[in-house]
Image (spheres, grey):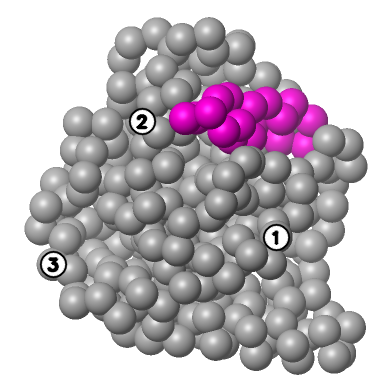
Amino acid sequence: MSAPRNFPSASQSSYKTAPTRSVSVDGLDFVYRQLGPEDGVPLILLIHTAGNLDDWDPRVVDGLAARRRVITFGNRGVGGSGGSTPDTIEGMARDAVRFIRALGFDQVDVLGMALGGFIAQVVAEEEPHLVRKVILAGAGPAGGDGIDKVPALAIQDTIKSTLTLRDPKLSILFTDTANGRRAGHDLLRRLKERTDNRDKDISLTSVRAQMKAIKRWGRQAPSDLSAVRQPVLVAHGENDRMVPSQNALDLAARLPKGELVPLYPDSGHAAIFQYHEDFVARALGFLEA
């Protein structure tokens, strides 16, 4: 890997205190945070729909950063990053590649969650020399089962949550069971640990663009993914309402080097946050193998 250009030293702190930085990408500032060791192949994290830098579970980021340089970022128009959010997954993928190259990297690993997992597939397919390994969490292939219904489900859950004064994350990301409710409230507490220099909320305009992109992704002709030659780890909850769990099985079967984590029990869209200890251990083992 070539040395990054003008790249500040990685923060050795926790995600709670990692500084928010920015890098110019085609004249627009993209915000990001990084922590962990400064050597080795960086791990780029791609967040779910409507998420900003502060929506990554700090237990997942800190766990991965114990052994890997981890970089979270806001893609174009997301949170504190400039520009307008594209309304296609392919457009988002191109912006992600521009961000990675702006930091001077010529090889990275990628972890994509939900929407981020859709983007990660396109980046891996279009940039085979840039991406070494991929982790897909709560994601599915283009044309995957039920993916085109994600926007409608998310809107319904958000409206219901607003009327009942609940955080939409509880119903969108977790199961409506004792374990799911407990895991959801635990995550909400963790997401509040960072109190200084928080990211800007994502705009409604950007969320609409993301929803449009997801609907298009879900209605595309099913992708066979045979061109994705990198090793890919697939993680999913067994009761994911948003991206039905069958999509994890489809991904693992279609990917030439796909490896499926046993579906996490009694968990939904945020299974990797609910089972963060197990997920971090499996992800590090996969990346270091």
Residue at 53% from the left image edge and 81% from the top image edge: 151
- Quadrant hosting residue 80: top right
The residue sitting at 49% across, 81% down in the picture is 150
Magenta residues span 15-33
Residue behind mark 1? 203
Task: For marks 2 and 3, give the CA distance.
Answer: 23 Å
Q: The N terminus lies in which quarter of the figure?
A: top left
> Which residue is labeled 3 in the image?
224
Give residue 216's quadrant in the image.
bottom left
Judging depth in this view, the residue of 155 and 253 nearest the camera is 155
Q: Residue at x 89, y 42 (%)?
A: 195
- Indicate the secondary structure of the residue bearing disc 2: strand
Q: Is residue 193 above or below residue 225?
A: above
Please tell me which of labels 1 and 3 falls first in the chain. Answer: 1
Q: Nearer the viewer, residue 185 or 42?
A: 42
Q: Please name the residue that numbered disc 2 is placed on.
A: 108
Q: Amino acid at mark 1?
A: Ser
| Earlier-in-chain disc, 1 versus 2 | 2
